[in-house]
Image (cartoon, coloured by chain):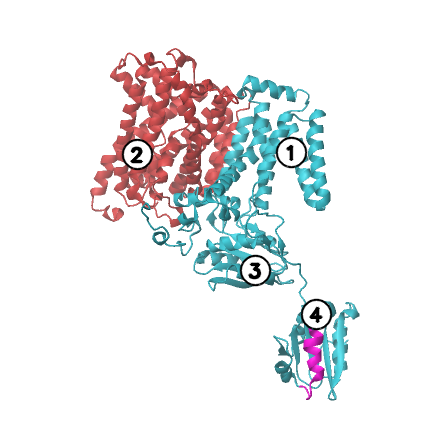
Chain colours: A cyan, B red
Amino acid sequence: MVTNIKFPLKVEQLETFIKSKFEHHSEDDLIFSVYTHRNKKIAVWGIKYLIDANRLDSALLAPLLDHKKAWKSSLLLNVIPVENGVISNDIDEMFEKLITGSVFIYIEGENEFVTYPLAQQEERSLDTSETESVIIGPQLSFTESLSTNLNVIRKILPTTDLVIEKLTVGKVVPREVRIIYMKSVANEADVNTIRQRIQEVDVDEIEDSSALKQYIEDSTLSLFPQFLLTELPAHLSYTVKEGKIGVLAENSPNAFIAPSTFFSFFETTEDTYLRWMQATAFRLLRIISIAIALFSTPLYVAIITYQYELVPTALLVSIGQSRSAVPFPPIIEALLIEMMIELLREAGARLPTKIGQTMGIVGGIVIGQAAVEAGLASNFLIIIVAASTLASFTTPNYLMGSSLRVIRFPMIVLAGVYGLIGVMFGICFLLIHLLRVTSLGRPYLSPLYPLRLQDFSQVFFNPPPNKKSERASMYRPKDQERFSKEDAMEKRDIEE
Amino acid sequence: MEINLSIKKGQRIRAYYLFFVIIGIQIGVGFLSAPRYIFEKAHQDAWVSIIVAYLFMILVTKVMFVILSRYENTDIFGIQVHVFGKWFGTLLGIVYLLLFTSELLSLLLSYNEVVQVFIYPTMPSFVMPILLLILIVYSVLGGIRIVIGVVFLFVIMSPWFFPLLYDPITRMESAHFLPLFEASVVDLLKGAQTTSYSFFGLEILFIIYPFIDNKEKAKRPTYLGLTTSALIVLVTTIISIGYYSPNDFDLLDWPVVSLFKSVAFSFMERFDYFIIAEWMMVVIPTAILLMWAIVHGTERIFQVQQKVTLYVVAAVLLVLCTFINSIVDIQKVTDFVTTFGFWIIFVYPFVLLPLVLLKTKRKVSKEVRK
């Protein structure tokens, strides 16, 4: 076997060498064609399934063979109408480029070969979002192709102020990662932190951006996502305009956004498109839903098991009647039904969409109705579990929603063991934990603590657009003013 | 030991958090039984005692501020070493640490007692202390910023139950307050001294002062905090006096809890259970501030790693809570803390003030001041 070669050499030698390096791969995949042009042998090679065959024929081979004069490597670059041609004689680099879809031309007798990137990008077309659905506003979601995603972002934010930095992560499988931020708005310290954290990821490969996110998050032990994952370009551009930093990776239909606070997971871009009053009402509803999702079932368990004196007699009688057929303690009853709901959710997520829908309806009715009739659970509990499940699905962010659903289970156990005291312990622990979590070093529970009253209106409510003259100060943007308040709100007298 | 402390920028807190710190540390389990003990001493004039105690407390705070302002940036440990010299100053520092530890112990014991009496009579007495200590250790591990954060958040989240007092207010009996000013001056002062137990925690100012970023604004939030917690005690005491007959006070150990018994809605009643559980949120700020003071103080005096002190103190408290479980013993601990704390918190600053003024006037200490 030939271990190394030196230019110039015969085309046959080159062919044997390349094929010997390729011996474990399928021979058919490697195209190695030799043409004779003006008594000079020209070799053209590449990998079949990576190359755009149409362009190879029309843009490369046709001009190559139709040429009237004898070829030289340097001449190729000037004549062949394919962009980004490179002259090189580095054989190792050649193999690296070969597997990413480049085509090579070698003219016998020359000291180097010419490389043309002719890769064919296979990708799905842009589609509407599946995991984060919006009713009004842009529906577009990211795809797996980084260049498409960048194209979309640039189209939404056509400004030179938008910086898209390029980084590479992964030693064995290098993957392109992009940091996106507004130069005049984003906090420089934050940009440096995230760039440094990505550069310090020293692994063989990362799967995609959501895996990268887990490598660089502040705390891996916390149940809460510290960076916000989104598949909506509109959401990414919206937060980038606020001074946050977005990160995209090749082969990943998700971007993540840092720094993110706890409450930013309950904002949607839709809030901007709705009228501000409705948007405020819905956002408050989502924030209240956190409490419903987390505490309604545990409170039921605690009160029915230990502190039933809390319930007035009339209500207690009806709860007692519905529970009269149930032989289990409330904690078993609650865990059973919660488990069923989680099974339904997980199965619904795994099954094909068409079957999933049927199963959801059938499962819901069967479990709800039959569990009560069989005496496994009380009607009352079914209502409470349904409410808490619904509440957990109002969270616009899937990762945050699933965190909330997981936290419910230890809460139910605490309630079953220590009653109201247990629930209270859970609430206190959760709050202390949220206070301790940071996102890119910034407090997670901001603007609640550290207290920033001026940000309250933007986080908990959605003020009318003309009142939003300032960006939220908790992310410490470089430029806090969106627009000048004086210019935007001219004082007018009553019209005569 | 360095007299003056230099605190990193990331560890400093804004002055307005003092408002929450003061309320957080002053309102604890003692508050639940305060009306009863004050009533014991001053009867229907208990509210006068509270006002007297409040005025005295304001005076003490003024003295504390004067003492602290004589130095650049220090706490009680530094001041004592500076005034009394290394050995005696350290010894007095240890007295403070003991005060904090015993306050924390009494807090854990009395909350455990309330829970056992009202909700779980048969619960082993180590369960509640374990739950509380988990929360305390977890927050103190986060450092001063997290401690202040927990105090702030819990203080703003707890007072939702105050509107429920509308019900006992409508059932108040104005005759219970008559005759006015029947109690003698001695009784009133005794009542004021008993009230002081509810105002314990004031001494945290001596420890937390160097951490405040904008010291020139520290006074107003402190006085506002003191006033708010005094008002809370005053209002609940007045409601208690009006709501209960004098004989009731002999039977009720925690009159404030029982105040909530009468509130009833069509979907929920017996709010006293809720109050007991919710009180965990009121106890935690007090407890973590005390624990933080212990941990920080030990590091100041003995240069012990904070984590070591934290775990050791938590373990010792847990063992003590397990063994002290009879009502008589708990009462002994509380009585000890009441007396010990009264002298240290309310009397000692007046002793310290002239000494500090004398000491800081001398030439030698000029460099310490500036």
Pair 1/3: label in front: 3
The magenta stretch is A55-71
What is the secondary structure assignment of the residue under circle 3?
A: helix
Q: Earlier in the sequence, mark 1 or mark 3?
A: 3
Q: Which mark is residue A338?
A: 1
Name the residue that disc number 3 marks.
A152
- Quick one: label 1, few (<14), some, or many (20+) residues within 10 Å? many
Q: CA distance from mark 1 to mark 3?
A: 41 Å
- Number of numbered discs overlaid on the protein picture: 4
Magenta part mainly helix, strand or loop? helix
Q: Amino acid at mark 4?
A: Ile
- Type of residue at label 3? Val
Give the farthest residue toward the front: A496
Q: Chain of mark 3?
A: A
Amino acid on which the number 1 mark rests in the picture: Glu
The magenta stretch spans residue A165:
no
Q: Amino acid at mark 2?
A: Tyr
Whole-angstrom CA distance, mark 4 to mark 3, is 25 Å
- The verdict on a common chain for dots 2 and 3 is no
Q: Are marks 1 and 4 in contact (CB under 8 Å)?
A: no
Residue designated by label 4: A51
Callout 4: chain: A
Task: Please check whether the numbered discs 4 and 3 fall on a single chain.
Answer: yes
The mark that comes first in sequence, 4 or 3, is 4
| Residue receiving disc 2 | B223
